[in-house]
Image: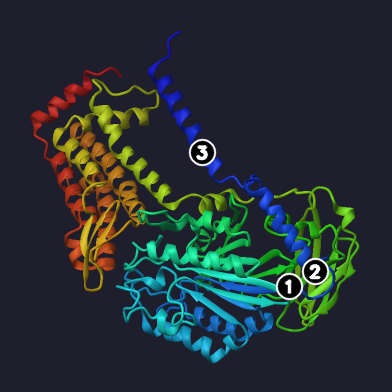
Amino acid sequence: MPFSKTAIYLLCVLLLLSIFVTNLLNSIATDHSYSENQREGENFTKYLADKYGRITDAKENLIWFMQISDIHLSIFRDPGRISQFQQFCDNTVKKIKPAIVLATGDLTDAKAKDNLGSSQVKTEWIYYHNIIKESRVTEETVWLDIRGNHDNFNIRTLNSQENFFRNFSVQGKTYPKSYVHYEEKNGVRVAFIGIDACPEPGLRRPFNFVGILDSQEQQQIRTLQAEANAKADHIVWFGHYPTSCILSLDTGTEKLDLRTLIGDSKGSQVYVCGHLHTMAGRVPKMYTRHRKGYMEIELGDWKDNRMYRLAAIDHGIFSFVDQKHNTWPLVLVTNPKHAKYTLPGREPLQLIPDSTHLRILAFSDVNIDTVQISFDKISWMNCKQSEGPLYVCQWLPHLFLRDINYLYVTVSDELGKEAFVEHPFSMDGSTLNFDIMARILLMLDARVVFQAIFGSLLLMNVLPLVYLRWQRQPPTCRRRLTRYVLRSLWLLSKIDKIYYPIVLYAVYVPLGPWAVGELIDGHVGVVFAWGILIKGTFLPEPFTYMYGGVQLLFIQIPLIFVLSHTLQKRLYSSYSRGLKRLIENLPFIMLLSVQLLLAYFFWLEYGSLAFIFGPLRTWSVLLSVALWYKILTLSPDYCRKLVHLNEHTPS
């Protein structure tokens, strides 16, 4: 029995979909990372195990540090960001006493009062500088800050006077870009490598979302990595952008693959970052383990959520917990290791089954009263304080050698505040899965994703009309609404003066310039789908694809349906006046309002020149109006021809 065309099309779609899903799952797989470097990993973890020895109740071989990200200090909105950041430096850091504090970018907001314009605001940087200085937090710990994309808005060059990071940050005067800091405490040697992927020049928003590593910065990072491999047992990488949002330029020599470079460092355990703000709370635990075996963990923002992170390396084993500001007590279990976050081949997990004590870091803004642990929530044992925030309790690890087990911890302070922690662990290699959305966001390449979305929307914009134009009759369908839509689109595709402008616009979008304007104060640039030309430099900023995708999704594709609906009304409805005529054209009026709003936002972002010379946003308004007007003014003869064409097609 021969297959129908519909069945063949469906099979093709299913085949393409299955290939896509297979490739996606393979790209975000986290369960086979250790096998890539198994022999090297075994040798390294044996070295760490021999160095640190047995895990007991002593404070040696333990170091802890903190991270804060996306602070967004602003003089225009939410003054609590400033006052509570002051509390963080004055109280929280001094209570926890970390060896290091990592401030991973977007230190200031750098957005105008209208929330659309963007430029460096000196007063915001003065707030940042004064809070750190007046709190004397740098006398208590080492403060390692680095730039984020907001700290790079509207910056012509690294040495321009608008780059306030140089003068008002802690590390900016010494390290304006990527750098390394070494810390040795309690017998643990750690290299903290900061990655500054801010492009030069730094454009105003929104075309400043993806980090770019040029040839000079790629070479600098390679040098830092080689040096850290020789000097430290552990490497903690930090930066603002997730690795999925960092693009390495092709320099003609060997292009840097940041994920591979991090993975090839034997001591690399984690890359910590910010930038994605937990996707507005939709992915609160954005953590994953990469193919090379190290973890990447994005920290929720300080801006809206007031989050910070405590992390520790205890006998070579990395642990962390994310906490909301002013939530006490703070609890971090360092032994046994959390089952989800184990790093085979990068930490001496073999020390856990042979350990004599459970180890817990507990902090509060007042004295800790009790720390208790249980394995069944029935029998509770008291932990004793070893030294400082370290609490320990003897245990029998041989009772938990199989499967996932659970440790329960309760901590209370002298004011009666309590914290409860459920801590899964395993010693036979059993693990828990990472959230799939976290893996997608951190393990895919943002550029490829943006291009795929843009390309798909572009095809959706033009292929249906092209297909329908070549059909002698509209596709049949049982559903009345679907049949109505298909017939309307089919009729629309037959009008040359509508069809060709839509198709030509779709061809223009990926090729022609979208806007010509002052992308940086004093410098005119040209925006294309595939990048931006400014100051004689080409920036392959992939976020342009998402920006164009918004235009296609919310303007161009709806426009086609609105025009086809208007055409049906034009052909089969009698001429109406007043309110009825307004209601009939309401879909187009609403669409035009959205289009004008987007053009207005673009004017606020990049000024009058970009608004006037803006084919993507401004000129498309004129195109929409022209096409709509063309349908409303079709000649009666042409209308009769279309009606005749429609009526002589099978129902």
Q: Which residue is mark 3?
A: 23
Q: Give the quarter of the image for residue 357.
A: bottom right
Residue positioned most to the bottom: 134
Q: Earlier in the sequence, mark 3 or mark 1?
A: 3
> Please, is residue 622 above or below residue 357 in the view?
above
The residue to which callout 1 is attached is 62
Which mark's residue is nearer the viewer, 2 or 1? 1
Rounded to the nearest whole Å, what is the CA distance between mark 3 and mark 1? 41 Å
**Residue bearing mark 2:** 359
- The reply to whether residue 623 is visible in this rendering is yes
Closer to the N terminus: mark 2 or mark 1?
Answer: 1
Task: Give the structural element (helix, strand or loop) at label 3.
Answer: helix
Q: Are marks 3 and 1 in contact (CB under 8 Å)?
A: no
Residue that appears at 60% across and 88% down: 139
> In the displayed structure, would residue 435 be above or below residue 143?
above
Marks 3 and 2 sit apart, C-alpha to C-alpha, by 41 Å
x, y percentage for residue 141? 61, 83
Bin the neighbour count of mark 2 within 10 Å (Cα to Cα): few under 14, some 14-19, many 20 and up.
Answer: many
**Quarter the N terminus occupies:** top left
Please tell me which residue lies in front, 258 or 68.
258
Q: Nearer the viewer, residue 373 or 470?
A: 373
Query: Which amino acid lies under the numbered mark 3 shown in the image of this protein?
Result: Asn
Q: Check the image and report above or below for 459 versus 548.
A: above
